[in-house]
Image (spheres, helix red, strand yellow):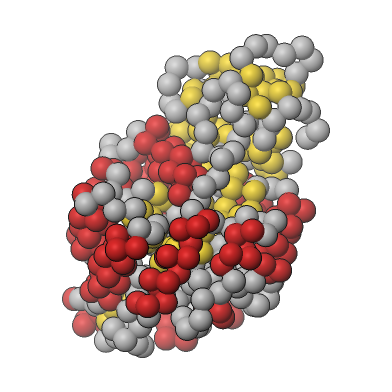
Amino acid sequence: MSATSWVLRGVRPLGADPVDLYVEDGVIVDAPLSGAETYDAGGLIALPGLVDLHTHLREPGREDAETVETGTLAAALGGFTAVHAMANTEPVADVAGVVEQVWRLGQDAGHCDVHPVGAVTLGLRGEQIAELGAMAESAARVRVFSDDGHCVHDPMVMRRALEYLRAFDGVIAQHAQDPRLTDAAQMNEGVQSARLGLAGWPAVAEEAVIARDCLLAAHVGGRVHFCHVSTAGSVELVRWAKGKGWNVTAEVTPHHLLLTDDLVSTYDPVFKVNPPLRTAEDVAALRAGLADGTIDAVATDHAPHALEDKETEWAAAAFGMTGLETALSVVVAAMVETGQLDWAGLADRMSVRPARIGRLSGQGQPLVPGAPANLVLVDSEARWTVDPRQSASRGRNTPFAGRELPARVVATFLRGRPTVLDGKPT
């Protein structure tokens, strides 16, 4: 679609009363437009475009699992107008050249903005700090750095990186996992792991790193963001740190808000994920933490895999789940339908705060005149059944296959240009 002017009839911003929304040259305006394209959005909920802090696009190196093209198309279909592409590619995004490559691939694809995440350490090995300044000053303007998939386990390396990034207002997104406590671990440590005979992954492996890094961030005045928190104890630690006024933020995945470790009893590797699915008590604590703002954001941790890496016996299967196309619906099921968030709260956790954490000036903005027209239209009454064969992502490893979910993205606009219209790519 090449139209630059739009009238979106009858949208409900953040679930409020219907209004007409006007878009011209990529910006929301306050007056009707002459000759604008009209879209009947009667009853659809309008939200600022979703922002994902944690997306694995796999390119360069694992294009058999995902590419920037296919991953960002999946993102647009899920209502995202910006994603942060994690650094664990092949080669690792630990130098300016690689992050610029990913950034340019995102520009060429055009489905959503791609903001590369730079590695904290060279090769994700946790030993030597990567070229943080060069990546921050590159064309990609990296502000989020992470060794995700690996924990920055050495406290001195973590301290130095936190100190260094203060100059660029950067943040370290920490994958909190003590490797010594999770060696050979396969699932959450507890009743289910004992019953199934699978090596347990204790909650303390996550919580110990979170506690340490809260203290380190406070000590040096740095910013730390905790990826995919998954335990009740982690929520309490983040709540404690925020109560101290420390510069700490956290995210939770959609799957950790809805699924529990009971599902592992099927031995279906689609439920194998890092961190592992936890208990119903943990899920309740994560929901409460997201509702009260202790957890700042929902991030997908979209982790597509080639079939041969996932459809195998449990012990050999890769960790990870896809999530871009189902994220909004899962959060609606877990949080909106349960009354723990309204639509404004969902927009805050899936757009406003993620954009703020990633320092994205043009995303997560209120839908008011003068703001960039990055927005998503959602049919809140729709019900749909997840079919992995229909996914735009190359990954088919969704834990929600065959499940009916509420709410569906109807349209996504990136700076006033529709990337999705009537539920289909434009």
Residue in the image at 79% along x and 15% along y: 35
Q: Is residue 218 above or below residue 352?
A: below
**Picture quarter with the N terminus:** top right
Residue in the image at 74% along x and 57% along y: 104
Q: Position of residue 415 (x, y in %)?
A: 67, 35
Question: Who is closer to the viewer here, 87 or 407?
Answer: 87
Answer whether residue 235 is visible to the viewer in this image. Answer: no
The total number of labels drawn is 0
Answer whether residue 99 is visible to the viewer in this image. Answer: yes
Q: Position of residue 222 (x, y in %)?
A: 38, 59
Q: Is residue 24 above or below residue 126?
A: above
Q: Residue 57 appears in which quarter of the rendering?
A: bottom right
**Picture quarter with the C terminus:** top right
Residue in the image at 18% along x and 76% along y: 191
Q: Residue 418 appears in which quarter of the rendering?
A: top right
Q: Is residue 5 above or below residue 424?
A: above
Question: Who is closer to the viewer here, 276 or 216?
Answer: 216
Q: Is residue 263 above or below residue 326?
A: below
Does 290 sit left or right of 355 as displayed? Answer: left
Q: Position of residue 240 (x, y in %)?
A: 20, 55
Residue in the image at 70% along x and 62% along y: 100
Q: Position of residue 171 (x, y in %)?
A: 46, 58
